Image (spheres, helix red, strand yellow):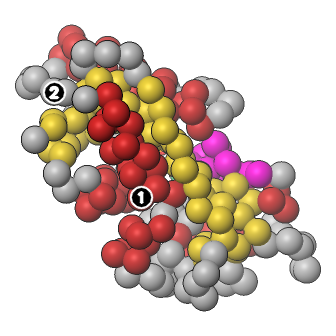
Amino acid sequence: MLKVLLASRNAGKLREFAALLPDVTLVPWPSEAPELPETGAFFQDNALQKAEGAAAWWREHGTEAIDGVLADDSGLCVDALWGGPGVLSARFAPDLPTYRDRNRRLLDMLPEGADRTARFVCVLACAPSTGPAFTVGASVEGRLALEPRGEGGFGYDPIFIPEGSDLTFGELPADAKHTLSHRARACAALREKLAILS
Ligand code: ITT
């Protein structure tokens, strides 16, 4: 079984990767490890920065042998907000304490009658212990709901309705999100790439 260090502190992502990669042993990013910088302008830059930063830290401080490091940079891109919050999704409205508030703030930024199309994007960076790092990416198209709906998932899930559904990611069961989400599609692309590499 592959053993991979998951360079993320986002509990929602951790839950999803455990479901999406059941055949991989995921080593959590240790609580004593540093915050990984993500200063790039693109998802791809940030994903690589996190994976390579985590790999370098693990080489010095790691407590077990791993096959590689996996990092995820993702976000919600809203057309009416010129693609925002995008790479800044985790840093949107830092004055607000909860995603319940941030979701409302985001919806309030859209003028009445605005185009509500949006997409979730996920770029995964994989830094294998024995080779160069690479990235794979995927997205899911959809639209913003008029109101937050549903308690499932995390982050912006209650305001995003994927194409072909009337329910938000917050309302859909986790299994349904995992059939079509940006992260599920990126994991499928990762599997394909790893199969080609092995
Ligand atoms: P790590 O860098 O530690 O992985 P992070 O939360 O800072 O955690 P990102 O910089 O990639 O991660 O920010 C992504 C943000 O986009 C995340 O905090 C959520 O707000 C949002 N997001 C990404 N995927 C999502 C999903 O599947 N459902 C809801 N919101 C999502």
Q: Residue at x 39, y 52 (%)?
A: 188
Position of the N terminus by quadrant: top left
Image vertical order of residue 194 relative to residue 191, above or below: above
Residue 172: x percent and y percent?
45, 82
Q: Is residue 115 left or right of residue 196?
A: right
**Structural crowding at the residue carrying mark 1, measured as other residues with C-alpha within 10 Å and reported as few (<14), some (14–19) or many (≥20):** many
Q: Picture quarter containing residue 4?
A: top left
Q: Which mark is residue 52?
A: none
Q: Nearer the viewer, residue 149 or 43?
A: 43
> In the structure shown, which secondary structural element does the residue marked by tag 2 occupy?
loop
Residue 177: x percent and y percent?
43, 72
**In the image as oriented, which residue stretches furthest toward the top?**
60
Residue that numbered label 1 is attached to: 184
**In the image as oriented, which residue stretches furthest toward the bottom?**
166
Q: Picture quarter containing residue 164?
A: bottom right
**In the image as oriented, which residue stretches furthest toward the front?**
196
Q: Residue at x 30, y 58 (%)?
A: 20
Q: Which mark is residue 66?
A: 2
Residue 9: x percent and y percent?
35, 44
In the rendered structure, which amino acid carries the disc numbered 1? Ala
The answer to whether any part of residue 43 appears in the image is yes
Position of the C terminus by quadrant: top left
Q: Nearer the viewer, residue 119 or 102?
A: 119
Task: Identify the magenta region.
Answer: 83-95
In the rendered structure, which amino acid carries the disc numbered 2? Ile
The answer to whether any part of residue 95 appears in the image is no
Q: Residue at x 48, y 64 (%)?
A: 181
Residue 162: x percent and y percent?
59, 74
> In the structure shown, which secondary structural element does the residue marked by tag 1 occupy?
helix
Image vertical order of residue 73 relative to residue 162, above or below: above
